[in-house]
Amino acid sequence: MHYQTFIPPDILKPYIKYFWALESNGPDNFPTTFSAIVDGCPGAIIVQSEKKSFSDEEDKKLPDIFLYGQTIRPVRLSAAGKFDAIGICFQPHALKSVFGLDAVELTNSCVDLNLVNNKKQKHLSEQLLNATSVHEQLKILSVYLVEQVKNNHQKTDDTTQFALTQIIKSNGSISLKELQQQLQLSERSLERKFNRSVGISPKLFSRICQFQQSMKQLRKSDYDKLSDIAYEHNYADQSHFIRVFKEFTGFSPIEFKKQSQEVVENFPTLKK
């Protein structure tokens, strides 16, 4: 598989971490299984192939261009034959700040992106299908997203944005009680704001940030024992780290390294 990442234009950097493109080079009828692991970010995937879509765990066909929310458990998707795909990794707040959606409505779910399209724009799938290169497709997506941001009147509030920034900076280790006191909000009030803008609670988002930092260390093989990762990222012990890892990936750390190939970050293919 050929994988590339692309930096978004400056105007979209507050909303998008990166674009990615994946070109499959397997046999025409060879199925590919992906395992989308928990990463704290919503996203979008555009699939272009003869069969036009991914299938979910229940073998239900997904739209050829779909927007998905936060995942709180690993999700498996499959694609049959050769395909090209473009993806968007959004910032955690993008469902609210880009599309004006209550993020919790898409937690562990997805929607056809054409259904949230700006009515003044030409059908997005049609534009992408007529594009002649990945770079042209990314330009089309960027124009579309800039328009969405400009027309969106339901921005992420400053309080939630500040809390997000502090949790991310601390890799999930910040005291939520202290954060609530600093913001002069009750636990329930902050949770409601997070559900609307991010799709999950501040506590779960903190756990995901902590997990993702441990994943970075695992990817680099920068450890002697798993307990090194556990203690460096404030897990109680190695068993605690393994439980959390399995909750968010579906595998133990050792199984993950043996059974998956992470071509796309947080979207690995599973080995046969």
Image: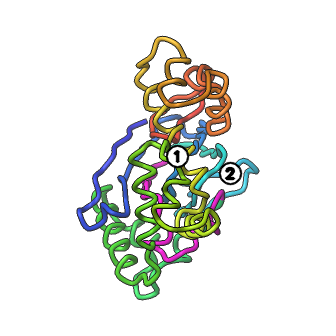
Q: As drawn, which residue projects farthest toward the bottom?
A: 120
Q: Which residue is mark 2?
A: 56
Answer above or below: position of 249 versus 88.
above
Examine the rendering and report whether any part of residue 51 can be seen: no
The picture quadrant where one finds residue 63 is: bottom right
> In this orientation, which residue lies closer to the viewer: 48 or 145?
145
Residue 205 locus on image (x, y percent): 55, 51
Three-letter code for the amino acid on which mark 1 is drawn: Asp
Q: Secondary structure at mark 2?
A: loop
How would you rate the neighbour count of disc 2 (Cα within 10 Å): few for under 14, some for 14-19, many for 20 or more? some
Q: How is the image coloured?
A: rainbow
Q: Is 125 contained in the magenta span? A: no
> Which residue shows up at 49% across the image and 57% down it?
179
Q: Secondary structure at mark 1?
A: loop
Three-letter code for the amino acid on which mark 2 is drawn: Asp
Q: Nearer the viewer, mark 1 or mark 2?
A: 1
> Which residue shows up at 29% across the image and 65% down it?
139
Q: Which residue is mark 1?
A: 39
Q: Quadrant of the N terminus?
A: top left
> Residues under labels 1 and 2: Cα distance?
18 Å
Magenta residues (range): 83-108
Residue 171 locus on image (x, y percent): 44, 42
